[in-house]
Image: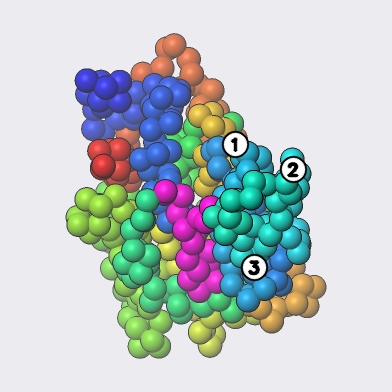
Amino acid sequence: MTFFNQLKERYEEGKTLPQEFYTDEEIFSDEMKKIYFKQWLMVDHVSRIPNPGDYFLFNAEKESIILIRGRDSQVRAFYNVCSHRGSRICLEEEGTKKLLVCPYHAWSFSAEGELKSARYMPDDFKMEDWGLKPCHINIYQGLIFINLSMDEPMDFNEFIAPLTELVNFHNPEKAKIAARRKYPTKANFKLVLENFQECYHCGPAHPELCSVHEKDWVFTMGAGLGTAPEKETQEYLKKIQPWIEDCKTRGIPSKTYLETKEGLSKGLNRYVDRTPIGNGNLSQTKDGKPASKLMGQFKEFDGGLSQVSFNPFSCCYFTNDFGVMFIFKPLSILQSEVELIWLVNEEAEEGKDFNEENLTHIWDVTTAHDTTIIENNQNGLLSHSFSPGVLSQNESAVTYFYDWYFTNMRLP
């Protein structure tokens, strides 16, 4: 029996995972291969690289990926590994280059990944055989997705299909990046993801978020449908039903999507909902007032919030006037990074249509608080006194997350 299976035998449903799931290097290595490298990962927005030669790096675990716009305006993804002796090629996080030149022996590559220069090679050396290794990439509505699998990944159209209606309505393809923040987190990535699967902690930890949203929303929908007791959830859904019906009459998508059993069996974990922010607020800002001009297909403010989760590593929150991309990256067994990217209408002007501090306030302070909470969790979990605790009724999605996790770890 493998060490993972031994640990799995010790797991009790309704409790947190045994300590070694967060501390063992062998487990972490298997998780990267069996889970992280097989997901379609949202990594950024196309407006970051508007011109030919513009590039940025996406770094996670031991991998570094170059995302670059070619001379034909197409965005491509390549492993940041020279095909000569394996050196990293791009060392700066972002920039613009006519050629990608390896700093070791000066092999140079085009933005299309072709090898253009390699000095003093044998006569039978074929330049066309030694280009950069491509990484799977798809772009949907301006959102860039990559897949780190060395094999053929799941069909992207099948993956994105249940999420398209709501994403299309918000139309992030017609948006631009207004702000970006990174939150280095000294903790195992599963603690980062678990924290985002529940809102049991929201009351004591996130006063700013809770002040904007209606109390019932925080309890029943803060981490998505099905994360609170059935009775309270149904009462909340009944209360907002007139709002949902009004959305339908105005042609605004309002269906909730929970991952199907078939999807779960394939290792998928997608989710969509749209609910009112509540308290008469129109946007996720400090005072509840709009942060920018309308985005997507909205004609007026209705105070709605859309939650779109592609998988536990990638999700978006959209209000009427802006979007927030959440990107969760494992870096090492005890080091993660959370990156937030705020999107606004591509025609919005800073200082006129939006103020960056107002736009970012709620999720900036909330994520900073989360970083502290998660790091405290990790520090306590390292103690030899730690043993798995019982999950509350408001943490049922953590168990759901574990089921998804174990399903992926069993898949070939």
Contact? badges 2 and 1 (CB < 8 Å)? no
Distance (Cα) linking label 3 and label 1 = 30 Å
* Residues in magenta, as a range: 133-150
Of the residues shown, which amino acid type is indicated by label 2? His
Q: Residue at x 35, y 88 (%)?
A: 249
Of the residues shown, which amino acid type is indicated by label 3? Arg
| Residue at the spot of label 3 | 69
Contact? badges 3 and 1 (CB < 8 Å)? no
**Residue 233 screen position, x and y as percent:** 29, 57
Q: Residue at x 34, y 28 (%)?
A: 17
Which quadrant of the structure image shows residue 356? bottom right
SS label for mark 1: strand
**Residue 159 screen position, x and y as percent:** 34, 63
Can see residue 45?
Answer: no
Q: Nearer the viewer, mark 3 or mark 1?
A: 3
SS label for mark 2: loop
Q: Return the residue nearer the eye: 410 or 183.
A: 410
Q: Return the residue nearer the eye: 127 or 31.
A: 127
- In the picture, measured across the screen, residue 24 lies left or right of residue 99, that is left
Q: Residue at x 63, y 75 (%)?
A: 73
Circle 2 crowding by C-alpha within 10 Å: few under 14, some 14–19, many from 20: few
The dot on residue 105 is: 2
**Residue 343 screen position, x and y as percent:** 62, 68
Mark with earlier residue (2, 1): 2
Which quadrant of the structure image shows residue 345? bottom right
**Residue 106 screen position, x and y as percent:** 75, 47
Asked whether residue 319 is drawn in magenta, I would say no
Q: Nearer the viewer, mark 2 or mark 3?
A: 2
The vertical placement of 100 against 178, above or below, is above
| Residue at the spot of label 1 | 185
Circle 3 crowding by C-alpha within 10 Å: few under 14, some 14–19, many from 20: many
Distance (Cα) linking label 2 and label 1 = 35 Å
